[in-house]
């Protein structure tokens, strides 16, 4: 059952201004292993795109490629192009720090810094030498409101972030990313460590965020992908098998390999 109903543009009919990320023949090799093989896909702006597939198929590597996080691995090689705002972000001249400001990332398990709630949210801003207290206060409040957390923590901003529940910590991580006003938000299994109620909270939050942010999410939960995402990509052994409207992929997939995976015949 679809929890949120929205009108979706066909991927084949996307105009250039409707594309947030245009990936062309992307291949990634990590530690001498080819993890992604000539991936090409156009990710629509202001939508939720889910990436599904077996563990080890390359989902997280694809996500990491969108803000060049794969480069933290000593032996890495990337070929192909990833276009954002008319730039191929894989070019050497790309400002990686600026890229990661525009392309935020939230990981599977909440990882708050050992500091206050306020300092967690303002951390990235301070790294950019934005130290005006009034501006920081406004940015922290705005980010926490957008992450649906402000009402729960506004009286506790200077308490340690570790006192928050798991669901609250994950929303804090989203607020920390949102403080930098990213155009794209990458989510790697954002609800896998959360209980059902906290998961619903995050899913509702994502629906709100996509009004002004493009969201790309890796998930093992196919019910979640079918429930909240506008588009879904299925990756198998580093190759893009199918990428289409989520309703279509989960009810009438074109490829038998996709059907076998979503019906549980393997994976």
Image: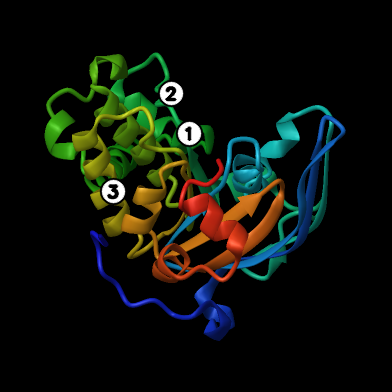
Q: Specify whether 160 is left or right of 43.
A: left
Picture quadrant where residue 3 is located: bottom left
Q: Are marks 2 and 1 in contact (CB under 8 Å)?
A: yes
Q: Distance of mark 2 from mark 1, alpha carbons?
A: 8 Å
Q: Residues within 10 Å of mark 1 (few under 14, many from 20)?
A: some
Q: Specify whether 241 is left or right of 204.
A: right
Where residue 89 appears, as percent x and y from the top left, is: 71, 56
Labels 3 and 1: the sequence-earlier one: 1
- Locate the N terminus by quadrant: bottom left
Q: Give the residue displayed 48% in from the left and 53% down from the top.
A: 262
Residue 209 visible in rendering: no
Q: Which residue position holds label 3?
A: 203
Check the image and name the residue furthest to the front. Answer: 265
Q: Nearer the viewer, mark 3 or mark 2?
A: 3
Q: Give the residue displayed 24% in from the left and 51% down from the top.
A: 204
Check the image and name the residue furthest to the right. Answer: 32
**Number of numbered tags placed on the structure image:** 3
Residue 53 visible in rendering: yes
Considering depth in this image, is 14 or 153 the residue closer to the camera? Answer: 14
């Amino acid at each position: 059952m679809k929890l949120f109903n929205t009108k979706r543009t066909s991927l084949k009919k996307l105009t250039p201004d409707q594309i947030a990320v245009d990936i062309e023949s992307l291949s990634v090799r990590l530690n001498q292993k080819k993890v992604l093989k000539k991936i090409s896909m156009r990710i629509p702006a202001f939508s939720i795109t889910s990436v599904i597939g077996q563990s080890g198929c390359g989902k997280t590597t694809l996500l990491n490629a969108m803000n060049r996080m794969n480069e933290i691995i000593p032996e890495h090689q990337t070929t192909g192009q990833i276009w954002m705002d008319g730039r191929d972000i894989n070019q050497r001249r790309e400002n990686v720090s600026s890229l990661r400001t525009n392309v935020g990332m939230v990981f599977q398990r909440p990882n708050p810094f050992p500091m206050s709630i306020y300092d967690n949210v303002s951390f990235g801003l301070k790294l950019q030498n934005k130290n005006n207290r009034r501006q920081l206060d406004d940015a922290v409040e705005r980010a926490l409101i957008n992450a649906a957390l402000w009402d729960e923590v506004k009286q506790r901003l200077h308490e340690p972030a570790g006192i928050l529940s798991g669901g609250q910590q994950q929303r804090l991580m989203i607020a920390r990313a949102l403080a930098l006003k990213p155009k794209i938000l990458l989510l790697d299994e954002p609800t896998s460590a959360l209980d059902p109620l906290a998961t619903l909270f995050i899913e509702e939050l994502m629906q709100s965020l996509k009004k002004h942010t493009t969201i790309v999410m890796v998930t093992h939960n196919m019910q979640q992908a079918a429930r909240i995402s506008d588009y879904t990509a299925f990756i198998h052994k580093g190759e893009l098998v199918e990428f289409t409207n989520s309703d279509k992929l989960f009810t009438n997939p074109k490829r038998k390999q996709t059907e076998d995976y979503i019906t549980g015949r393997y994976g």
